[in-house]
């Protein structure tokens, strides 16, 4: 009986000791990384429109010698590491809190020529509805959060397109918020009943393809691409050429500003024929009247 009790004691001791040793080792390792168990993140992002400081000793450089600019000081971002539990808020969130759709309308119509920002209406239509046979997206009715994020991604270089990078870099955060609110306030194009063709595209929209780990497109973008979450774009009524260009960019890795690379992975599992079919399918969801 005593032998049995001794064995139980040993087992219980091991059960308690193992996690305790792990906890102590983890605490020691975290403390050794600098100043405490929880510390600010060291992830740095480029400061917005910050001037590059001159390097130390530049004033004493010889005549005619160009001093190399020093790298800008890193800006710490909370909530971006496993050891930092500070709430993280994206820049576009603050911009939208004080955004005014009327100011966005004026900016969309007149642009900001002194900063190289042309009128948005030149490409995206007078009311945010682009030409159906063009390469520009329809913005009317898109979520303000999505539009603001995309513009800031263009400005920061997370999403690349020569014209849009130039335009976004000429806008400050408040102006981006104004534009996002304005286009989100516009009525989207009228929708027809859910199209039946192409059938392959409808299948991907409604059911996906489990064999290729492709969820239904409607899970994120709404049935027929009619919209779902605030950071997920409405696909219904987009110009087919624009849709194809973006999917190709995801496939090639040229566009990488999707959350955790989700769209890059999905686009790579689609064939070019399926992408073109989806483009026709979403364009066909518009009311032709």
Image (cartoon, rainbow, N blue to C red):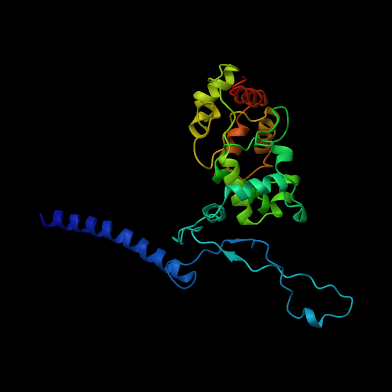
Q: Position of residue 77 (x, y in %)?
A: 54, 61
Along the line of sight, the residue nearer the viewer: 280 or 82: 280
Horizontally, residue 82 falls left or right of residue 263, namely: left
Q: Quadrant of residue 132?
A: top right
What is the x, y in percent for residue 114? 77, 56
**Image quadrant in which the C terminus is located:** top right
Location of residue 130 with respect to 254 vertically, above or below: above
Residue at image position (68%, 30%) is 244
Q: Quadrant of the N terminus?
A: bottom left
Q: Residue furthest bottom?
A: 60
Which of the 4 quarters of the picture holds residue 184? top right
Residue drawn at point x = 60 percent, y = 37 percent? 140
Q: Residue at x 67, y 41 (%)?
A: 253
User: Which residue in the rendered view is the most extreme toward the left?
Assistant: 1
Q: How many marks?
A: 0
- Residue 227, given in percent of the width and then of the height, sits at 52, 33
**x and y percentages locating residue 134 in the rendered image:** 73, 31
Is residue 159 in view? no
Q: Is residue 134 above or below residue 156?
A: above
């Amino acid at each position: 009986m005593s032998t049995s009790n001794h064995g139980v004691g040993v087992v219980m001791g091991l059960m308690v000791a193992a996690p305790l040793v792990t906890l102590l080792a983890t605490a020691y390792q975290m403390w050794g990384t600098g100043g405490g168990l929880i510390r600010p993140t060291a992830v740095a992002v480029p400061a917005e429109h910050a001037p590059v400081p001159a390097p130390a000793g530049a004033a004493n450089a010889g005549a005619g010698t160009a001093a190399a600019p020093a790298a800008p000081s890193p800006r710490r971002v909370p909530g971006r590491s496993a050891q930092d539990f500070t709430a993280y808020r994206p820049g576009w969130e603050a911009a939208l809190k004080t955004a005014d759709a009327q100011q966005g309308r004026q900016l969309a119509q007149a642009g900001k020529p002194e900063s190289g920002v042309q009128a948005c209406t030149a490409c995206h239509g007078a009311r945010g509805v682009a030409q159906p046979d063009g390469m520009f997206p329809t913005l009317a009715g898109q979520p303000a959060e999505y539009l603001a994020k995309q513009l800031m991604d263009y400005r920061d270089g997370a999403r690349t397109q020569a014209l849009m990078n130039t335009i976004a870099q000429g806008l400050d955060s408040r102006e981006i918020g104004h534009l996002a609110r304005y286009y989100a306030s516009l009525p989207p194009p009228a929708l027809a009943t859910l199209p039946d063709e192409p059938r392959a595209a409808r299948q991907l929209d409604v059911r996906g393809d489990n064999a290729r780990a492709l969820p239904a497109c409607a899970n994120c973008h709404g049935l027929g691409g009619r919209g779902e979450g605030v950071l997920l774009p409405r696909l219904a009524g987009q110009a087919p050429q624009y849709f194809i260009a973006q999917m190709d960019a995801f496939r090639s890795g040229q566009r990488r500003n999707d959350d955790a690379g989700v769209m890059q992975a999905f686009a790579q599992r689609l064939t070019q024929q399926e992408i073109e079919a989806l483009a026709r399918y979403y364009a066909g969801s518009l009311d032709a009247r």
